[in-house]
Image: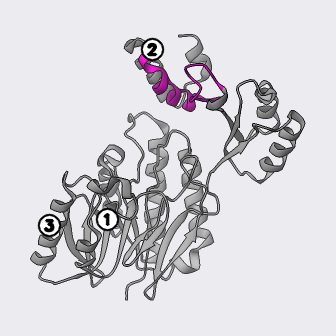
Amino acid sequence: MLNFAVVSDIHFYHRRTPTSHITTAFWEWIVTHHDKLAKCELLILAGDIFDRFIPSHYPDIKQVNHFFIQLGMWLKRQRIGLIVLEGTHSHDRGQFQPIYTTLTSLNVEVYYFDSVCVQTIHGHDFLFVPDNWHPSPLQTAADAAQAVMEHGVAQVDYAIMHGYMEYQLPKLVEHAFPQASFEALVKHSIHIGHVHTRSKLRKVHAQGSFDRLAHGEEELKGGDILINGKVSQLVNTRAYDYISVDLTEVSLADSFSQIATLAPSMQAGYLRIMAPRLHPIFNHFPKLIQEYPWINFERLYDKEKQNDGISKALLPVSEFDVLEQLKLWSPKLPPAAFNLIADLLNSSQTKIEDVKSV
């Protein structure tokens, strides 16, 4: 059987988990798991490599291009091929295409798929299914079956997909891939990206996101590896922290004590403080920021104890969080004002002072 590793939902250019952190974490992931990865013939990136489309002058673009060139050179030395599947259109938007062109010019073994198709790679048949192929998941399954038939086989060995199965998001089954239909097309295993939580059901392996990108993603992150037919997780030990602490019934002294216990264990990330609006801990945010500069502190007011119209809002202390906050307040803002502030915040060079001066 073929040995390969699968990573998905990397989300370069993310607004909250920095691209610089993700690239560093990826290289540490390679170093940590080098011995296992060296047994692989392929590294597969199963969609949502990017989080959003950004203008060409953004410095993150140069950083990601450099990352992929270095990754390609490492894979070439290891004689490992790279497969990239297009993910959700609103995220990837074909942004890997110029990187693919660069890597092919460097004689890196690289494959890029943005349509439903079957291809034989390293002697094994793969079915590739990107996200947003067709509004109907049943039609996508029919197109996949047609591709398998036209390839001249009854079943492929593996499927690489981006989207979700019914069991992953049962409340959104109308947009889910029909798992039984795809399993009938595949001999061994299906590896699917999109849902950020790792899971498994029968032939389906969802590796989850490579890094943490939001609160509620506290589980282990990383990628999957298939060695001798067995799938296991390769953990990203540098995953960004998104931690919440409820201080609703906690005194100020005990609040400081809880934060002092949590903070040293955080490598970098967000610590969200949940408490009533008048809790004294919120008056001490400047002190917390000064004492723990590697942490982004956030406020989440207890909506059950608030009477104002923005009690549900996450009140931020960083410029990226302000943009998310604006989405909640935008109905109360003139469109021109909202767009101007959003444009300012979209720039990685923008500081809070720029917004205050508008």
- The residue depicted at 86 percent of the width and 33 percent of the height is 252
- The residue depicted at 48 percent of the width and 68 percent of the height is 74
Quadrant for residue 150, please give it: bottom left
- The image shows residue 217, relative to residue 220, as above or below, that is above
CA separation, marks 3 and 2?
46 Å
Residue farthest to the right?
253
Query: Is residue 1 in view?
Result: yes
- Sequence-wise first label, 3 or 2: 3
Q: Compare residues 248 and 2 and report the one nearer the observer.
A: 248
CA separation, marks 3 and 1?
15 Å
- Residues tagged 3 and 1 counted as in contact (Cβ below 8 A): no
Q: Find numbered disc 3 in the image and state the secondary structure of the residue it sits on.
A: helix
Dot 3 crowding, Cα within 10 Å, few <14, some 14–19, many 20+: some
Q: Please name the residue that numbered disc 3 is placed on.
A: 142
Query: Is residue 87 in view?
Result: no
Q: Position of residue 61 (x, y in %)?
A: 44, 43
Q: Compare residues 324 and 56 and report the one nearer the observer.
A: 324
Q: Please name the residue that numbered disc 1 is placed on.
A: 161
Q: Is residue 328 magenta?
A: yes
Disc 1 residue type? Met
* Residue 110 disc label: none
Which span is picked out in magenta?
A: 306-331
Q: Please name the residue that numbered disc 2 is placed on.
A: 332
Q: Compare residues 223 and 13 and report the one nearer the observer.
A: 223
Disc 2 residue type? Lys
Q: Find numbered disc 2 in the image and state the secondary structure of the residue it sits on.
A: helix
Count of numbered circles in the view: 3
